Amino acid sequence: MLLLQQGKWLDGWQEYEWRWQASGGPRQRPTALPAWQGESLDGRTLLVWGEQGVGDEIMFASCVPDAAMLAEHCIFECSPRLEKLFARSLPGVRVVAARADAKRTATDVDAQADVQIAAGSLPRFLRGSLTAFPRRERFLAADAERQQHWQARLAELGPGLKVGPPGEVEARDPTVGNARSTSSRCAV
């Protein structure tokens, strides 16, 4: 992480691959599919899978549109809690929810892909310099109905600071193994 903080992107992302060796770190997704190593994806389908907590999935999902532009087709297997959010936010990408019981086993999407990569490994091929980070106003799209609901609800409360309870915090995300989840339960 220090190399990334220093702006040494190529070295930092390469060293980030050591996360697979860390005790209590993420686990590889068992699959017979070869790992994508940055080669051409012309005419191929890429399977991207989330390997860490919800926050990391959101952060690394910012690379998925760029990966999708390189491939004929792109499938993003994510936490069920993020499926609707990513389906709205990633046009042209087939978003599928990982089943908690099958998160670390091959699934039917494997038969539809040619190569696979963990979402956290995408920056190694797509974010080699500061200029490789695209300038976007945003990449996540809010649910329009929920947005209208909460705009109206907050307007009812009048002007001023609005503070509420943080919600129910999960101690563990069952789809990720030992990784701890600090995010509140919410519909996105």
Image (tube, grey):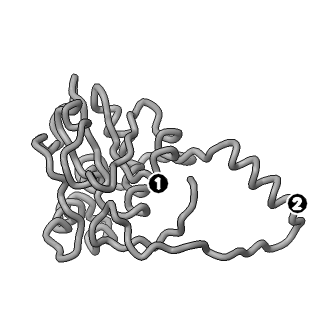
Helix, strand or loop at mark 1? helix
Residue 144 placed where, x, y %? 67, 42
Tags 2 and 1 in contact by the CB under 8 Å rule?
no
Indicate the amino acid at tag 2. Answer: Glu
Residues 73 and 40: in front is 73
Rendered location of residue 168, percent (x, y): 55, 73
Q: State whether residue 171 is above or below residue 120.
A: below
Label 2, label 1: how far apart the Cα atoms are: 29 Å
Tell me if residue 66 can be seen: yes
Amino acid at dot 1 = Arg
Along the line of sight, the residue nearer the viewer: 111 or 88: 111
Location of residue 116 with respect to 80 vertically, above or below? above
Q: Residue at x 43, y 46 (%)?
A: 134
Q: Quadrant of residue 95?
A: top left
Horizontal and vertical percent position of residue 73: 30, 28
Specify whether 82 is left or right of 67: right
Q: Is residue 74 above or below residue 170?
A: above
Q: Residue at x 47, y 33 (%)?
A: 91
Res. 30 mark? none
Report whether residue 132 is seen: no
**Is label 2 in a helix, a strand or a loop?**
helix
Mark 2 neighbour class, 10 Å CA radius: few under 14, some 14 to 19, many 20 or more? few
Q: Nearer the viewer, mark 2 or mark 1?
A: 1
- Residue in view at x 34 percent, y 49 percent: 98
Name the residue: 20% across, 37% down: 110
Disc number for residue 81: 1
Quarter of the figure that contains the N terminus: bottom left
Question: What residue would you read off at disc 2?
Answer: 156
